[in-house]
Image (tube, grey):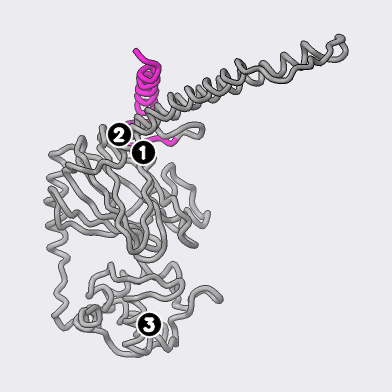
Amino acid sequence: MTVFSRFAVVRAALAALLSGAAGSAVAVQSKFNLAPPMTPIASEIYSLHNMMLIICTAIFVAVFSVMFYSIWKHRKSKGAVAANWHENTTVEIVWTVIPFIIVIVMALPATKTVVAMKDTSNAELTIKVTGSQWKWGYDYLRGEGEGISFLSQLATPAAQIEGREAKTATYLLEVDNPLVVPVNKKVRVITTANDVIHAWWMPAFGVKQDAIPGFARDTWFRADQIGTFRGQCAELCGKDHAFMPIVVQVVSAEDYSKWVSGKKQQMAALADDPNKTWTRSELMARGEKVYQANCQVCHQASGQGVQGAFPALAASKVVASKDDQIALLLSGKNAMPSWKALSDVELAAVSTYTKNSWGNSAGDVQPAEIKAARK
């Protein structure tokens, strides 16, 4: 058994102990080490980490042991006299060859792992991940579940964030709509972003891929165990960067099929007709929910915004202008992100809600108008 294999065995035993102690439903993030690996790539990364840590520790101990021994053994108080010599070809060869061999020993397995990390071929499921300030959008592009789309955002109650309630074990690591994937299936993840650079980071899977506006980058994972695994945005992306968690639920093939069926039924039930003429009461009821989920964190429940940071919507000239407001919702401006990910009905509803709340009275916006503006 090679040294690298021994590390893998030790790693597997440690991961099993940690998973058993914490329960298989949640991957534990150690305070002193990497998260227990739950994918083949994460296992290789974990083993590489341990191997290189041991090599570096051995070098540290060897170098400083020789240095401190030399200082102690040849100190002036013992009458030591400095040697007077110029060069030693043998010693120079030795201290060149040994580091070269160490680098090769470290580089070969690391290169093998990096190459494997980039191999997204033959994926059984492809999911597009879109980062936005401050939520994730998931679109199932290929495989069972193709056509499913939804947004995922923080579900931690405001009372916990503001310190009015005790924080739970999953504080700031819980979402309303987790990503669901089947166990033991290769999942290709394509990342991009709508506004600024984000990073989709799942420690237990050994995955961290930047999501860059205008670019599509990909990575992959194959989860070995059923459970719920948590990650975060790993790129400083704005004031609510800390409130952008990732939750992945790995389920059995049978449970995944059930989830796909249920999700498609749910999407069909919620499907909205953008060509329908909606009443103001319908738009206001829908718009209030959209506002609370997406806009309230910046513009506040009162519509007064935050002075110097986010403008008030009450008595706003932009809100009063239908064209200006639609353009802003679709394109964004400054700290205001684009909300193209929302449906025509959702955008029309929230626009109508803001036009008729907090003393505003600026008429309605129909989904067909949003649909036309997208073209």
The residue that appears at 49% across and 74% down in the rendered structure is 310
- 122 relative to 3 in the view: left or right: left
Dot label at residue 39: 2
State the image coordinates of residue 138 (x, y, percent, origin top left).
Answer: 26, 56
**Majority secondary structure in the magenta region:** helix
Q: In this rendered view, identify the residue nearer to me: 357 or 74.
A: 74
Q: In this rendered view, identify the residue nearer to me: 184 or 289.
A: 184
Please, what is the three-letter code of the amino acid marked with disc 3?
A: Ser
State the image coordinates of residue 239 (x, y, percent, origin top left).
Answer: 49, 62
State the quadrant of the N terminus: top left
- 196 relative to 372 in the view: left or right: right
State the image coordinates of residue 98 (x, y, percent, origin top left).
Answer: 52, 20
Q: Which residue is mark 1?
A: 206
Q: Which residues are magenta?
A: 1-29
Q: Secondary structure at mark 3?
A: loop
Single out the mark in the foreground, 3 or 1.
1
The residue that appears at 41% across and 52% down in the rendered structure is 233
- 138 relative to 77 in the view: left or right: left
Q: Is residue 159 visible in this depiction of the protein? A: no
Disc 1/disc 2 C-alpha distance (Å): 7 Å
Q: Secondary structure at mark 2?
A: loop
Disc 3/disc 1 C-alpha distance (Å): 46 Å
The residue that appears at 50% across and 34% down in the rendered structure is 31
Looking at the image, residue 158 lies above or below residue 118: below
Q: In this rendered view, identify the residue nearer to me: 327 or 350.
A: 327
Q: Which residue is mark 3?
A: 357
The residue that appears at 69% across and 20% down in the rendered structure is 87
Q: Is residue 14 magenta?
A: yes
Looking at the image, residue 318 lies above or below residue 4: below
Do the numbered discs 3 and 1 sit on residues whose CB atoms are within 8 Å? no
State the image coordinates of residue 38 (x, y, percent, origin top left).
Answer: 32, 33
Looking at the image, residue 339 lies above or below residue 19: below
